[in-house]
Image (cartoon, rainbow, N blue to C red):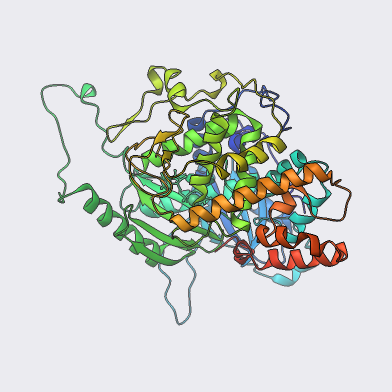
């Protein structure tokens, strides 16, 4: 069902444009077709955050009249936007035009009396709406249109791919079906904002900011929600603003290192989420990791959340990916397909381990697109040369400077099709000298590996780090084998001229089938079977792939 949005025009509120990062799957012919100015990452973040701060989450009765519901809430001020979704119950996300409306609603909201249990009186923006008299309402209820927050089933996706007209069309279809929707994006910013309210009990001026695939334009429905507690703004002190010869500092507790400070902060926030955070369940404090974090599920939204602190560099790398994703419409289509391909073959996993991560795969695609002739994407060093004074950014001694206004970056002259790029991607990495070379998007060319990890992808900002240090030789070998086989399948299809009208899975659909190797070796024998049976078997095997363990709420 399509969501229905009712929009009042409110001065100073965010327009649909603030979607920014999630838009334009575009046509894939060239990267230069979309000339509309694109928002800077920082603008999108600022708008989304402000929008989330005047938004509330409500668990609604199942039987409800949408009209009355909106009328009731409008007592507190005009509503800019709203939608419903189903998780463990019916939820509404309601965005007021003004922040004051939220306070007005909170003032009229009571803390429930619990009978035998006791309620912790935390006044959040997560409400529970009850009907005083349910029989009246039932008679007038209308069917509430709900937004889907999870990706289409593998079966549906597979059918859509088989029905596409070309491989280019397949890649764009996959992107369209799997990318975060406007509503899911709103829910992600809202969830961060709700967590921020809890963290603000300790650190009133903190911000909880999403990063990673929720904001870098490469997020797939159901992906985790990475967020970090930003304490940088707290106590920022401008010496020029004070008069006289005095300088005032806060009296603070000192601890031996930055890492211990991070652990202490995350530990109390973790406790707080566990004890007082409405809807926060399964809180795990993983404080001894290289990057300490608190992991929890936000039950209503269904998001698996990873909360870290001091992660400004990761936010900057999210911005860089956002720019790469927005520069050319082929980038996201190719990244989504490669990620999906990797997942279908269990090259990636939701469990941490020796697997390649989605982040590494994205870097590989970016690197590959930098290597095309003419290049489809510029190098990071080039983006740095375009930067002006206001773009300058040094974080913890690392130079994270690059141009932030992506409208000033010239579109690529390269007109290669997605079909060709997909094929060439597999060929390129099927034959890459992983044993001696490192992947480096800063310079856009191979470098000698500085250390012997099987796969070396340089962190673009912390250049001494390898983002794929975890990947084992056997996992890398599996990637290479599958890449070669996938290239081979696409070449075979070229030779045999299979038409999209044939009954066989073709193009990208054929590549997503598990165990390409087996399929290839048995292909000749299998050709005798009726197509319908083959497709049935293939669908069965897709169903059992790990991606499908994602439940309908997108939780892993
Ligand atoms: N990151 C990093 N170095 C790593 C791993 C992660 O800098 N070795 C940063 C990246 O900015 C990445 C973010 O942390 O985008 C979140 O990591 P992760 O959740 O693993 O990746 P996502 O890009 O969010 O992809 P996914 O959809 O798989 O969650
Ligand atoms: Mg993530």
Position of the N terminus, as image quadrant, is bottom right
| Residue in front for this viewpoint, 516 or 195 | 516
The residue under the point 64% across, 37% down is: 424
For residue 20, which quarter of the picture?
Answer: top right
Q: Is residue 506 above or below residue 114?
A: above
Q: How many marks?
A: 0
Residue 94 in the figure: left or right of residue 402:
right
Q: Is residue 102 above or below residue 50?
A: below
Q: Is residue 94 visible?
A: no
Q: Is residue 540 above or below residue 78?
A: below
Q: Position of residue 237 (x, y in %)?
A: 24, 31
| Residue in front for this viewpoint, 429 or 468 | 429
Residue 246 in the figure: left or right of residue 2:
left
The residue under the point 55% across, 50% down is: 480
Position of the C terminus, as image quadrant, is bottom right
Q: Position of residue 39 (x, y in %)?
A: 56, 28
Residue 449 in the figure: left or right of residue 222:
left
Q: Position of residue 516 (x, y in %)?
A: 67, 57
Q: Position of residue 541 (x, y in %)?
A: 70, 67
| Residue in front for this viewpoint, 72 or 169 | 169
């Amino acid at each position: 069902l399509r969501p229905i949005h009712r929009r009042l025009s409110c001065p100073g509120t965010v327009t649909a444009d603030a979607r920014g990062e999630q838009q334009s799957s575009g046509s894939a012919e060239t990267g230069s077709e979309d000339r509309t100015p694109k928002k800077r990452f920082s603008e999108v973040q600022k708008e989304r955050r402000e929008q989330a701060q005047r938004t509330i989450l409500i668990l609604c009765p199942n039987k409800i009249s949408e009209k009355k519901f909106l009328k009731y809430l409008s007592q507190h001020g005009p509503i800019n936007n709203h939608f419903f979704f189903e998780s463990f119950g019916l939820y509404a996300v309601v965005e007021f035009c003004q922040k004051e409306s939220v306070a007005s609603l909170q003032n009229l909201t009571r803390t429930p009396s619990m009978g035998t249990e006791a309620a912790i009186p935390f006044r959040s923006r997560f409400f529970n709406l009850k009907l005083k008299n349910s029989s009246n309402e039932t008679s007038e209820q209308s069917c509430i249109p709900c937004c889907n927050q999870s990706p289409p089933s593998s079966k549906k996706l597979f059918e859509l791919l088989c029905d596409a007209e070309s491989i280019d069309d397949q890649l764009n279809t996959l992107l369209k079906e799997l990318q975060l929707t406007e509503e899911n994006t709103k829910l992600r910013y809202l969830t961060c904002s709700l967590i921020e309210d809890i963290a603000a009990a300790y650190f009133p001026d903190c911000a909880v900011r999403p990063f990673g695939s929720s904001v870098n334009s490469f997020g797939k429905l159901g992906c985790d929600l990475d967020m970090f507690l930003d304490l940088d703004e707290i106590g920022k002190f401008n010496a020029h603003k004070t008069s006289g010869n005095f300088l005032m500092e806060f009296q603070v507790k000192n601890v031996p290192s930055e890492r211990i400070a991070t652990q202490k902060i995350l530990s109390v926030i973790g406790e707080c989420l566990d004890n007082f955070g409405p809807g926060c369940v399964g809180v795990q404090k993983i404080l001894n990791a290289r990057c300490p974090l608190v992991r929890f599920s936000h039950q209503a939204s269904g998001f698996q959340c990873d909360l870290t602190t001091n992660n400004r560099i990761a936010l900057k790398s999210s911005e860089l990916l956002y720019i790469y994703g927005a520069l050319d419409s082929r980038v996201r289509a190719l990244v989504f397909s490669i990620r999906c391909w990797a997942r279908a073959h269990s090259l990636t996993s939701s469990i941490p381990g020796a697997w390649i991560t989605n982040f590494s795969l994205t870097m590989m695609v970016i690197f590959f697109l930098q290597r095309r002739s003419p290049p489809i994407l510029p190098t990071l060093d080039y983006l740095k040369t375009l930067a002006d004074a206001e773009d300058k950014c040094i974080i913890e001694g690392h130079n994270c400077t690059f141009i932030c206004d992506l409208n000033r970056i010239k579109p690529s002259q390269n007109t290669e099709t997605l079909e060709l790029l997909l094929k060439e991607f597999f060929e390129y990495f099927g034959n890459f000298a992983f044993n001696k070379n490192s992947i480096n998007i800063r310079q856009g060319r191979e470098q000698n590996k500085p250390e012997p990890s099987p796969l070396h992808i340089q962190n673009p900002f912390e250049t001494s780090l390898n983002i794929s240090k975890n990947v084992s030789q056997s996992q890398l070998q599996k990637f290479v084998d599958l890449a070669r086989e996938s290239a081979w399948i696409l070449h075979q299809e070229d030779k045999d001229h299979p038409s999209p009208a044939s009954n066989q899975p073709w193009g990208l659909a054929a590549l997503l089938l598990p165990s390409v190797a087996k399929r290839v070796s048995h292909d000749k024998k299998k050709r005798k079977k009726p197509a319908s049976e083959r497709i049935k078997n293939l669908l069965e095997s897709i169903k059992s792939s790990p991606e499908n363990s994602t439940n309908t709420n997108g939780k892993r």
